[in-house]
């Protein structure tokens, strides 16, 4: 078995499910179990500046540049970062993952658990058919696999091993960071950008081979609280204000088709993801998404307008709106650094991999890092069907994803940062 797959299987055996509810950082202690393994591995491989933030569960390391002699006088090597997350989704358990390798997949149904009838079928997941002839890693039908994002962790670590062992590949400083709690949106909360000190970076947290992502949603969340007035229903005429019905009215005034059930591609939405209510009080929770910043702002304005209208109708203070931006589309921060996209495309094409570039209908740690000043597109890892029992990974695609990282590292080996701070070849 290759070093990459051996690593991957070791990492998925460690349960690192994060928790939405614990309120701690990291959200679960078990993430330290993997962090400790990654830390020791980086030390054993001889990386520099290996640092384990034991308080917040981040692991950092550097593969020192070996291209200094080749660069123009007065310049320095590029510091290129690679980031992946150690935690797995809290939606499905990651305890006792029992990965199974399916040799040379034949295009038929894969029975994950015969007794419970859990079947990974190309009828449900047609993209499976593209894996015909490839070796796949699947679950036993009871847990997620954890390819999201332990495939990324294993690929980055294997890249590090290869670069440390093969000095013939010229490269700049390669900074590595493994983060906790990405799945609960807190992966960059305690990310030490000053320590990481990279000029630019990639997250290895994508799916299908060739995925190259540098556009994501703008995201906001909103809480709508409606205060009503409860009166005996038999004597309620002109007295009762039914908060639940006003909440219903609020929802009915939103554009019907701007809803996750009816949108795809670059279409944004309002998503009511929770609602509870009585006559006295109703609370609704929404998430708002749009790739386009103008349309995103317009969506937020629609929420405010509905709130104002209902307050006019039912009285000031009936409806309260709390709204907060969560993250923004990274494209605005990537555009000044398009070499990140172009070099990733070149790396893929050198390996006969066709880049697949779609706007993400979600966010990434990279989006948040981009807004903190570290431009950070996302790369494929070779995993599929994240966050569930049907998750699987393609060994061929994982190996190629790792090769892509190596090629990108090599491409940036020919770059330098000049005295004025600009990156050039
Ligand atoms: Zn992920």
Image (cartoon, rainbow, N blue to C red):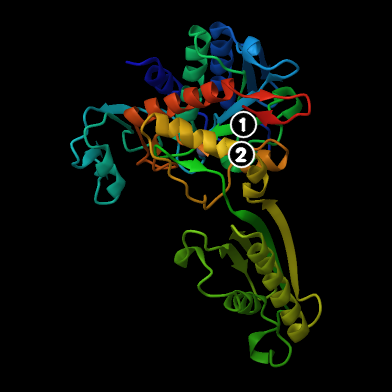
Q: Is residue 96 above or below residue 51?
A: below
Q: Residues within 10 Å of mark 2 (few under 14, many from 20)?
A: many
Q: Position of residue 49 (x, y in %)?
A: 68, 13
- Horizontal placement of 315 versus 95: left or right? right
Q: Is residue 250 above or below residue 148?
A: below
Residue at 42% x, 38% y: name it: 210
Residue situated in front as seen by the camera: 89 or 4: 4
Q: Nearer the viewer, mark 2 or mark 1?
A: 1
Q: Earlier in the sequence, mark 2 or mark 1?
A: 1
- Horizontal placement of 294 versus 396: left or right? right
- Horizontal placement of 334 versus 158: left or right? right
Tag count: 2
Residue situated in front as seen by the camera: 248 or 213: 213
Circle 2: element type: helix
In the rendered image, which quarter is residue 255 located in?
bottom right
Residue 366: assigned label: 2
Q: Quadrant of the N terminus?
A: top left
Q: Position of residue 81 (x, y in %)?
A: 62, 26
In the rendered image, which quarter is residue 287 located in?
bottom right
Q: Is residue 334 above or below residue 28?
A: below
Residue at 72% x, 61% y: name it: 323
Q: Position of residue 411 (x, y in %)?
A: 53, 25
* Label 2 CB sits under 8 Å from any ligand 1 atom: no
Residue at the spot of label 1: 201
Q: Position of residue 258 (x, y in %)?
A: 54, 69
């Amino acid at each position: 078995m290759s070093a990459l797959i051996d690593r991957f299987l070791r990492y998925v055996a460690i349960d690192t499910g994060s928790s939405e509810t614990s309120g701690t950082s990291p959200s679960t202690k078990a993430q330290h179990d993997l962090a400790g393994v990654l830390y020791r591995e980086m030390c054993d491989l001889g990386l520099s500046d290996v640092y384990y933030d034991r308080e917040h569960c981040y692991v950092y390391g550097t593969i020192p540049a070996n291209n200094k002699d080749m660069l123009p006088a007065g310049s320095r090597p590029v510091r290129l970062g690679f980031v992946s997350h150690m935690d797995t989704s809290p939606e499905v358990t990651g305890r006792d993952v029992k990965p199974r390798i399916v040799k040379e997949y034949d295009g038929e149904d894969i029975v994950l658990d015969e007794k419970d009838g859990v079947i990974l079928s190309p009828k449900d997941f047609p993209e499976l058919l593209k894996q015909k002839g490839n070796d796949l890693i699947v679950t036993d039908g009871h847990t997620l696999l954890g390819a999201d994002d332990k495939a990324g962790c294993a690929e980055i670590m294997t890249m590090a091993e290869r670069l440390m062992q093969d000095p013939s590949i010229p490269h700049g400083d390669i900074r590595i960071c493994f983060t906790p709690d990405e799945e609960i949106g807190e992966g960059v909360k305690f990310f030490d950008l000053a320590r990481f000190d990279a000029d630019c970076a990639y997250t290895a947290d994508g799916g299908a081979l060739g995925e190259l992502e540098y556009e994501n949603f703008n995201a906001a969340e909103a809480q709508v609280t409606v205060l009503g007035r409860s009166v005996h229903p038999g004597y309620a005429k002109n007295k009762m204000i039914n908060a639940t019905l006003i909440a219903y009215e609020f929802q009915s005034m939103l554009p019907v088709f701007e809803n996750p059930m009816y949108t795809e591609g670059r279409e944004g939405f309002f998503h009511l993801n929770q609602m509870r209510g009585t006559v006295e009080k109703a609370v609704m929770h929404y998430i708002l998404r749009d790739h386009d910043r103008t349309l995103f702002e317009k969506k937020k304005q629609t929420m405010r307008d509905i709130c104002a209208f209902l307050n006019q109708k039912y009285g000031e203070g009936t409806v309260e709106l709390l709204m907060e931006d969560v993250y923004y589309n990274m494209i605005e921060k990537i555009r000044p650094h398009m070499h990140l996209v172009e070099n990733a495309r070149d790396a893929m094409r050198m390996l006969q991999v066709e880049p697949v570039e779609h706007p993400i209908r979600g966010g990434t740690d990279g989006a948040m890092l981009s807004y903190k000043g570290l431009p950070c597109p996302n790369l494929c890892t070779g995993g599929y069907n994240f966050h569930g029992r049907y998750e699987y990974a393609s060994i061929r695609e994982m190996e190629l994803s790792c090769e892509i990282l190596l090629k990108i590292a090599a491409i940036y080996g020919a770059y330098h940062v000049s005295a004025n701070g600009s990156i050039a070849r």
